[in-house]
Image (cartoon, grey):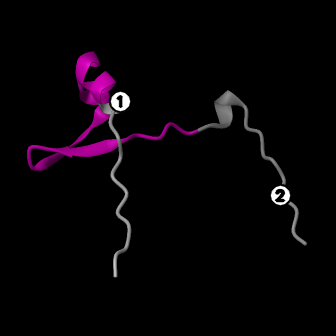
Amino acid sequence: MQTQTEIKLKDEERTRCEVWTRVMGYHRPVAAWNPGKQSEHQERDFFKETKTS
């Protein structure tokens, strides 16, 4: 049986993850959006496709 070890990183060891999304046919980083659009992005529901036969 394999056990999982929890890894804890200090804040200075972390790397920022930049989120990009496609808007109006081109890709842009979400961090470049205005605060209103960023809050709309956080409220999005993500679509998950289920396989049908």
Q: Which numbered dot is residue 4?
A: 2
Q: Is residue 46 left or right of residue 23?
A: right
Disc 2 crowd, CA 10 A, few/some/many (<14, 14-19, 20+): few
Give the image location of residue 41, x and y in percent: 31, 32
Give amino acid for label 2.
Answer: Gln
The image shows residue 47, relative to residue 40, as above or below, that is: below
Q: Is residue 22 left or right of residue 35?
A: left
Q: Quadrant of residue 33?
A: top left
Query: What residue is at 81 percent from the left and 47 percent from the top?
Result: 6
**x and y percentages locating residue 42 in the rendered image:** 37, 30
Let me know if residue 8 appears in the view: yes
Please check the rendered image and state whether residue 7 is part of the magenta-colored stretch, yes or no.
Answer: no
Q: Element at badge 1?
A: loop
Give the residues drawn in magenta, as a range. 15-40
Q: Indicate left or right for 51 with 15 as reference.
A: left
Specify whether residue 34 is in view.
no
